Amino acid sequence: MKIDQKKEVRVLLGNVAIARGIVEAGCQVVTSYPGTPSSEIIPAVVGFKKELGLNTYIEWSTNEKVAFDNALAASMAGKRAAVAMKQVGLNVASDSLLSSAYTGVIGGLVIISCDDPGPQSSQTEQDSRFLAMFAKVPVYDPSTPQEAKEMVKEAFKLSEKFQVPVLLRPTIRVSHAKQNVKLFPPEILDRPADFKKNPERWAATPRYRLILHAKLNKALQGIQERFEQDTKWNYEIRKKGSSALGIISCSASFAALMDIQEELNLKEPIDILKIGTPYPLPQKKVEEFIQKHQKVLVIEETDSVIEYQIIDKSKVLGRLTGHVPLESELVPDIIYDILADVLREMGLAELEKSADAKLDKLIENLELPVRRPTLCAGCPERAAFFAIKRALPRAIYPSDIGCYTLGLNLKAVDTVLDMGAGITLASGFYQAYHQDHKDIPIVATMGDSTFYHSGTASLLNAVYNRARFILVLLDNEITAMTGMQPTPGTGIMADGSRGRKVPLEALIKGCGVRWIKTIDPYEVKNFIKLLKEARKYTQSARGGIAVIIARHPCIIKYPEELEEYRIKVEINDECNGCNYCLDFFECPALLLNEEENRVEIDRKFCVDCGVCISACPRGAIIPVED
Amino acid sequence: MNVQIILAGIGGQGVLFSSRLFSELGLQLGLNVMGSETHGMSQRGGSVIAHLKLGQFQSPLVRRGTADILYSFEKNETYRTLKFLREGGLCFTNQESGEGFDNKVLSYLKKKNIAILAYDATAAALKSGSILATNIGLIGYSVGTGLVPFKHKDLTKVLELTSKKKNLALNLRAFELGFREGKLSQRS
């Protein structure tokens, strides 16, 4: 095996640094389901595997629970394993998380759950550390990419020593931060798979579960003691003497706080207690720190895991006292303002507000156009949503998580709950109306990757319980939103090699659906016709659920596909500026020329897909004659 | 040296590449690099902003009112990100021909001693062969003015290290063109 022995420094994205930590720890199995801000971890592990000639097994799993269990099994067989996901993915894996905390691990198991305060790209601002605490799983909480990498390695050791899974919780500002990071050669662990049968542990019945629970509690005590002793991740920063105000902080908030303290150059620098292991909290360390100060401010993201664990809160300021906002990301501006308020309240310093209100007002007066996220020009999903809205304008449109959430802009998405809920809400709506003898059209939309993730159980249930609705599967043959990860439909595996293809058609048929049609959504007119047929099927005596697979590759991933279709369009004088195309087709390449009150094509964005020809009620968008 | 930079634009304008360029520059100069990027949903056609801090920093985010330099490749994104600049900060903005800046904003910035240095980097990029090099044109311009703490030789070296092979000649052309015009702008 060829191993790079020299130490070097590279600028790495936080997620790439985490991947490097996984590799350096000698971890042999890495699994994941993509989701912002965690998606870059797996491709980076693949990169390091190839660069270093390692034998790591890496998979894109079909969902987070599947990923979790696959990694867990490797750990039960004695190997080091890691599983990565975004914070809401941990909800999907939570059943396994809670149970495995009891049964424990053999080889180190590190769970990486990336939080998204803000949220930038998620449905909730939940704090993964709470879920870990709920599961009684210890947590490492890094502040920077470099620290994240080192913590991964430490987490493997802790997991092995105490035989429990360990969670690493980077927030988006760690995962998507970049920093110069020191690289070390990977540890090579010679650990052949060796699963030792032990039914009282691995197949524990409730009686044994009680024993396992007691063991877990004991392990947590040991871990807490270790965290008390630890000075690498939990330490005080004190410039001189002791300040009246102390701050307890962790994660990316700590890093921001350090920079702010540097800028402020206060006469009396604030003492800071950095906590890198928020659960189980090193209580003694925290209590000693609180005793030394008049007041202690807790600044942590996304929620108040440290603050809740503090036993005597009489001197503590934080979310529970209204000093820290209950929602949103703690960006440096907000942390600065929190600090300014507390310093003023305590009579320690007067700082200006972070915002320049006058500049804000001047910019606000400019009424800058708001750039909302939108489907790309030429996106096949836009064509599908346009057809759906045209064919069944009064339907209920349950949808799902992916680029196609942006079908909202075309008014063809009514609900976005969580992965797989496009189908479950559709069947739920059907049953709720059907009970009242009402027949309403329902068109659910879901992407290919989401369907592989959690669509089959939902569809199976809907078929079994005689629901009737139309399901349009938007099959762009990739997981586009999170950065073009392959799906079982492509049959390509995480490292680029060939797996076994699992076609959508076979799965849908397997769920018991009898009406399945496939169409290219670029054929808008035929698609509209097909949707009407599907509606009829859902209403017919022997009908049921109708599934249309709207198949057209993502044009960003497969730009060569456009060559086949290239239809250059222009807008003629029939355009009367009615805005129909802007409101219901919403392509970024269509612009309103307000002076002339007509729509124009922005050639910077247009990809010549020609789909908008169908989007003008006056027929003013026409192909250019060569 | 401690420098805080904001890079702003819209999807496809090379904000992330520019950020990589300065990260690599930091590494070459032996400085610590810390920065933050936008990925995921917010990338779909929206504003793209990158924060970059070279020197002794721990957080990847620039607090408002503290950035030394703002590079913006699109006018509206310039307005949106001006708030990051400190008093005495520099704003290099791409200004396509015919575009002007709001007078009220300009005179307010003047009071804060913030200079707006506008340059038609789109034209420079097109002259160099492709609109894709707009970002590099603007960066070249800034180095040419001599107002930023980056050297011509360091940036060309870093361009060679980070550019894709097929884009290298284009990037170097746009950089040189911007550099020359930046230099001229300070003479007149």
Image: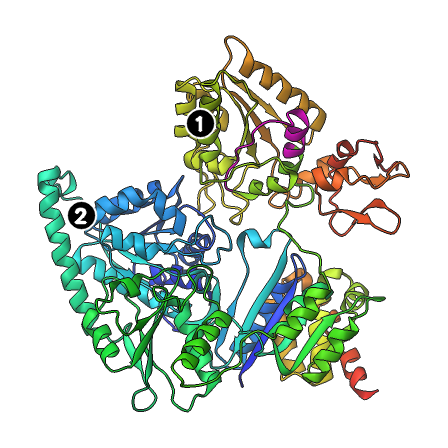
Q: Which chain is home to disc 2? A: A
Mark 2 residue type: Tyr
> Residue A428: which disc?
1
The part of the chain drawn in magenta is A384-401
- The reply to whether residue A86 is in sight is no
Residue ID at (38%, 89%): A268
CA gap, disc 2 to disc 1? 35 Å
Mark 1 residue type: Gly
Residue ID at (56%, 41%): A405
Report helix, strand or loop for mark 2: helix
Residue A322, percent across and down?
A: 39, 66
Location of the C terminus of chain A (image quadrant)? top right
The local crowd at label 1, few if under 14, some if 14 to 19, many if 20 or more residues have their Cα within 10 Å, is some
Foreground of the two, A473 or B173:
A473
Residue furthest right in the image: A573
Residue ID at (45%, 35%): A421
